Image (cartoon, rainbow, N blue to C red):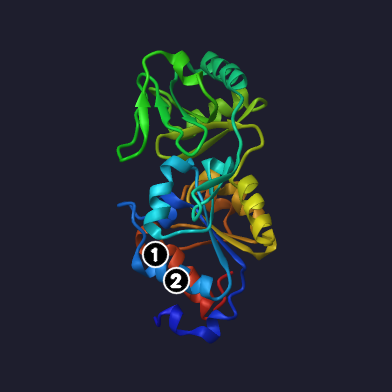
Amino acid sequence: MPSPASAPAAAAAFPYKLVATDLDGTLLREDHTVSGRTREALAAVTEAGAAHIIVTGRAVPWTRHILDDLGYEGIAVCGQGAQVYHAGEHRLLTSLTLDRQLAGLALAKIEREVGPLSLAVGRDGLEGKVLVGAGFRLQEGPLPAESVTDRTELWSAPINKVYVQHPELDDDALAQAARAAAGGLVDVVMAGPGVVEILPLGLTKATGLSLAARRLGVKAADTIAFGDMPNDIPMFGWARHGVAMANAHEELKAVADGVTASNEDDGIAVVLERLLLGESVF
């Protein structure tokens, strides 16, 4: 297939003004890199006049190093929509925190139903660490995290989210149980393997994406979104079209407008290259 960058006539007809991509399992491969092919496709899209926004469940401190490595200088939506971040200026534009007293009440309700949970919290701000409580299994990697032995330390400063794990329930079962027990107080999402999160009620990736799009003067009808997990469902509902990766969770595939190749096989580039060449995708 010819490089989309070599087809300016086709690129000029790119049908979207905004390309929104999730990060883990979508834009990133398993080795946490972005392939040359996908980089080229995104570069061709921006040359055609569209904007690219990364929309991730990761908070800014867990996202910044990836954005810097990509040379990404635009707006990113982080923390499941809680943070709108200007990567070029290394500046938070908006940040929404989770009420800690409400989170504690929600956790008490959940634990009454399923038993003790292992917890971690993401602190607010550009330098906000993840505080990890006893028994919580943190994924390996060069990410800012700090272990605490006293559970009360988790609530000692403003937070964006709470991560919960259960010794027996899998991610889907835990998310469903947590939603049933405390869904009127907080939102609960499954964002990846071992990642069930408690968020402010009403907060979704669509919330942050709509704020970022408004700053760019772009509408939902001008947007195509890519993702792989149930936390991407609201983003798909907001965008004109939502494309699930081949490796995506079945809940997301069920609401997607289409399914592309996996993150390992340049699924984003597969779709963008076709669109740049004027081919029909949906």
Q: Nearer the viewer, residue 22 or 247?
A: 22
Sequence-first tag of 1 and 2: 2
Q: Secondary structure at mark 2?
A: helix
Which percent across, then down, holds residue 265? 36, 63
Q: In which quadrant of the rendered view does residue 113 lie? A: top right
Q: In which quadrant of the rendered view does residue 108 lie? A: top right
Nearer mark to the viewer, of 1 and 2:
2
Q: Residue at x 60, y 18 (%)?
A: 101
Numbered marks: total: 2
Q: Amino acid at mark 2?
A: Ala
Q: Which residue is label 1 attached to? A: 266
Q: Amino acid at mark 1?
A: Asp
Please give left or right for residue 275 compared with residue 221 in the image. left
Residue 278 visible in rendering:
no
Q: Is residue 63 above or below residue 99?
A: below
Which percent across, then down, holds residue 219? 69, 60
Single out the residue that lies furthest toward the front. 89
Residue 119 visible in rendering:
yes
Q: Is residue 211 above or below residue 123?
A: below
- The span from disc 1 to disc 2 (Cα, nearest Å) is 10 Å
Q: Residues within 10 Å of mark 1 (few under 14, many from 20)?
A: many
Q: Are marks 1 and 2 in contact (CB under 8 Å)?
A: yes
Q: Residues within 10 Å of mark 2 (few under 14, many from 20)?
A: many
Which percent across, then down, holds residue 102? 62, 20
Q: Is residue 246 above or below residue 200?
A: below
Q: Which residue is label 2 attached to? A: 41
Q: In which quadrant of the rendered view does residue 275 lie? A: bottom right
Q: Residue at x 49, y 56 (%)?
A: 88
Q: Secondary structure at mark 1?
A: loop
On-image quarter of the C terminus: bottom right
